[in-house]
């Protein structure tokens, strides 16, 4: 099925704070082909990454029939889509429907690990590559625990998964897998200083950089940031959320120059109040208009070399949670996510870093 790339006026965000004057020019790109009828409404928490320079998006979850406020049932997907000159086309299928997992790029392939579906949390780890334009899926060793809503990244051929909900409880665990080992096996590394669900993480300069997340047992959101150095197996605090908020539900990706772009996420005050609501108040909370939730529309860059954040200003399309943010070639792709609890968006964007002072 061919999809036409939507051409529209681009939106510029940048230069609103101190820094080197970086700017990102955003333009809409095609919505993912609705191979499944409900997919046209957009999905949250999909897998996404690049394989041999080709952008892939797979899985995800949404409420295709009725909204969650009306008792709608969440659907999960297994289709793998690839993006090219013809827009999005079907490349294959995952072994199971899944969302809320981790994506780690290896260059020629991308690893999709963990997540959940209608049956519960998953331990599955799939490596997805391309052959003649079609997805080739191979299985890697299963995770030690069923993990969802974690963060992940790759350093060389080793993939890392941190935090999330592990066997039903918030986690501070960091696990790694050397995909080049003759007999790959998961290895436990130093624990994060706090338990975090839905953090963001990216790899740059030989280290892992992690922010945000919340403790689902207390409802407390974190504004902290940490750097993990694999050479010493240690975590070190770094500058956290620049506004004292949180990056819960945000999206992050490392750029070719080593800086890390972060977009979206929830409002800390509203989110913390929501996760502590009694069950009989949840529906009322879900009925507010999109603007009430104050999802973050800021676009930020973190420079690992200086340890500082640069504010690139506001971009309306960034105000979402549970999206995928992927660097592919010269583009920064923002895919899927939700605009408010239960309401997904099919709108996708491609950003280009266009200038520096």
Image (cartoon, helix red, strand yellow):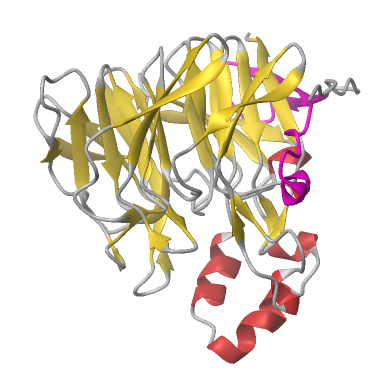
Residue 148 painted magenta: no
Q: Is residue 68 found left or right of 259 in the rendered image? A: right
Of all residues, the one furthest to the bottom in this rendering is 280
Residue 294 in view (yes/no): no
Looking at the image, which is closer to me, 221 or 63?
A: 63
Looking at the image, which is closer to me, 258 or 113?
A: 113
- Vertical placement of residue 285 versus 323, above or below: below
Percent of width and height locating residue 138: 35, 28
Q: Is residue 342 found left or right of 240 in the rendered image? A: right
Image quadrant of residue 62? bottom right
Residue 34 painted magenta: yes
Q: How many marks?
A: 0
- Vertical placement of residue 43 versus 301, above or below: below
Q: Is residue 164 found left or right of 118 in the rendered image? A: left
Image quadrant of residue 311? top right
Residue 162 in view (yes/no): yes
Percent of width and height locating residue 68: 69, 71
- Vertical placement of residue 325 versus 268, above or below: above
The stretch of residues the image draws in magenta is: 11-40
Percent of width and height locating residue 231: 11, 24
Residue at horizontal 51%, vertical 54%?
A: 245
């Amino acid at each position: 099925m061919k999809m036409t790339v939507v051409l529209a006026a681009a939106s510029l965000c940048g230069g609103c704070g101190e820094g080197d004057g970086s700017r990102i020019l955003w333009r809409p790109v095609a919505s993912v082909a609705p191979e499944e009828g409900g997919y046209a409404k957009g999905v949250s928490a999909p897998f996404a990454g690049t394989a041999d320079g080709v952008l892939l998006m797979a899985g995800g979850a949404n409420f295709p029939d009725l909204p969650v406020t009306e008792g709608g049932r969440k659907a999960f997907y297994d289709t793998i889509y690839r993006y090219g000159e013809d827009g999005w086309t079907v490349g294959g299928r995952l072994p199971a429907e899944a969302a809320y997992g981790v994506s780690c790029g290896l260059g020629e392939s991308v690893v999709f690990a963990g997540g959940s579906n209608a049956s519960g949390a998953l331990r599955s780890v799939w490596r997805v590559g391309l052959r003649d334009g079609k997805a080739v899926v191979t299985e890697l060793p299963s995770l030690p625990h069923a993990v969802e809503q974690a963060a992940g990244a790759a350093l060389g051929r080793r993939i890392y998964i941190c935090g999330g909900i592990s066997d039903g409880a918030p986690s501070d665990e960091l696990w790694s897998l050397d995909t080049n080992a003759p007999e790959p096996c998961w290895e436990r590394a130093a624990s994060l200083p706090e338990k975090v669900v839905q953090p963001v993480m990216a790899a740059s300069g030989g280290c892992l950089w992690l922010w945000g997340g919340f403790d689902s047992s207390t409802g407390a959101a974190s504004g902290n940031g940490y750097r993990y150095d694999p050479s010493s197996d240690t975590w070190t605090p770094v500058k956290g959320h620049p506004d004292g908020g949180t990056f819960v539900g945000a999206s992050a990706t490392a750029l070719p120059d080593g800086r890390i772009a972060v977009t979206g996420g929830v409002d800390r005050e509203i989110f913390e109040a929501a996760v502590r609501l009694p069950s009989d108040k949840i529906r009322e909370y879900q009925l507010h208009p999109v603007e009430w939730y104050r999802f973050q529309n800021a676009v930020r860059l973190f420079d690992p070399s200086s340890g500082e954040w640069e504010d690139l200003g506001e971009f309306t399309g960034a105000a979402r949670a549970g999206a995928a943010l992927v660097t592919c070639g010269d583009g920064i792709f923002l895919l899927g996510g939700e605009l408010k609890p239960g309401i997904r968006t099919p709108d996708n964007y491609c950003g280009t870093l266009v200038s520096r002072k």
